[in-house]
Structures are given as C-alpha cells and as structure tokens.
Image (cartoon, rainbow, N blue to C red):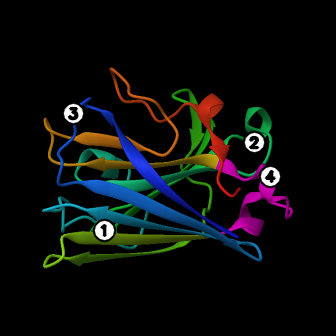
Amino acid sequence: MSRLLALQCVHPASPPRAVTVEARVALESSRLTVEFQVRTPRIHFNPEWPLDHSKWGLWEQGDVVELFLATGDIAKGGYFEFQVSPGNQFFTLHVLEPRKRHDEKRPMPFTHGSHWDEKQGLWTAILEVPLGSYGWHGDSDRLCGGLFAMLGEAGSRTYWSSFLPCQEKPDFHLPERFQRLIS
C-alpha cells in the first residue's frame, strides 16, 4: 500500500513559487517508509551537528522534514516525532502530551537517508520506521499522523503540512488534526 501526498505551505500565506514538497508513504509488512521530495533552489543545515544521535533543536537550525506518527490511542500512548535534515542529522521524540510531556530518552529505532541534488534542486529524504517497535499490531487504520517540512533560514522560514490548514502561528503538534497515513 502507498499514498502520494502534496504538502501545502501553511505559513506564511504566500510561499516561494520555486519550492514544492511531496511525500510518498508506503506500508510493506510492518515497515512504514516515507520518502519526501523537496524541490528548492537551496538547502539549509548545520554541517557541524552530529549524525550519530538525536539532536534537540534540529528544527530551529535549518531545513527538516518530519513524520508525526500515532499507532494507537493518542490519549493513552501519545505519538512519535521523527525529523531529518538535508545533512542527514535526525531528531526523535515520544510526545506524550503536546508541549507538556515528552520522553526524549525512549529508544526510537528508525533508518533515514538524505540526498541533495544541487543541479536538479531536489532534496530527497527517506525515513523507514519498524512499526513493531512502536506498538503497532498490523491494522493500517491505526496508522495516523502528519507529514511536515520547515524550510528556509531563520526569519524567512516556510512551514508545510500534509493535513493542516493555513496558520497564523505555525503549530504542528495538533494530534486532533492527524489523519490516516495509508488509505
């Protein structure tokens, strides 16, 4: 099963025309794969940040794509956040209650890769999540969440989402707006 989604700019109201964001979500056995394709004239990331561990604040330092994933009852188990930068740095977080409770120490296995093709202006990021590690028991209807991107330099960033409407102040941590990732 797979699904192709075009992400829409939700902030600011008028995004740069040269930028587009798409994501293909695929479920094979118990592995969820999300492949983001970001068409952009340039990328932004801090090349000095680590590649070997989750980096808090990654989203503030440059471009990232994100998967928010819930595999069951969000009120009971929360949801999981996965981010990847163009430099292949990553951040993971188990969100128990948005902006109130989280677990940044929980082991969150996933694989990821990032590739920048400057000639084509195409950044590709792939995230693969072994769903068994996140309490999933095989029901694709229980896989919900959102896909997001934050692009550009501080002060001129754009915020992209698969399911959210335009926002005055960007906020992706709205689990009540999550939708099924696989249809």
In the picture, measured across the screen, residue 51 lies left or right of residue 70, that is left
Depth order, front residue of 104/77: 77
Element on which disc 3 rests: loop
**Quadrant of residue 160 in the image?**
top left
N-terminal-most mark, 4 or 3: 3
What is the number of the mark on residue 50? 1
Q: Are marks 1 and 4 in contact (CB under 8 Å)?
A: no
Nearer the observer, disc 4 or disc 3? 3
Task: From the top left corner, tell me how far across and down residue 13 is, in percent.
Answer: 26, 29
| Label 1 residue SS | loop
Residue type highlighted by circle 3: Ser
Q: Residue 61 in magenta?
A: no
Counting residues from the start of the chain, the first of labels 2 and 1 encountered is 1
Coordinates of residue 155 in the picture (x, y in percent): 13, 35
- Whichever of callouts 1 and 4 sits on the residue coming sooner in the sequence is 1
Measure how far apart labels 2 and 1 are at the Cα level.
29 Å
The image shows residue 143 at horizontal and vertical percentages of: 72, 53
Circles 4 and 3: CB distance less than 8 Å? no
SS label for mark 4: helix
- The residue wearing badge 2 is 77
Q: CA distance from mark 4 to mark 3?
A: 34 Å
The disc labelled 2 sits on which kind of residue? Gly
Mark 3 nearby-residue class (10 Å; few <14, some 14–19, many ≥20): few
For disc 2, the neighbor class at 10 Å (few under 14, some 14 to 19, many from 20) is some
> Residue under circle 4?
141
Q: Give the residues in magenta.
A: 130-144
- The Cα atoms of the two marked residues, 1 and 3, are separated by 33 Å
Q: Could you tell me residue 127's position as x and y percent?
A: 50, 69
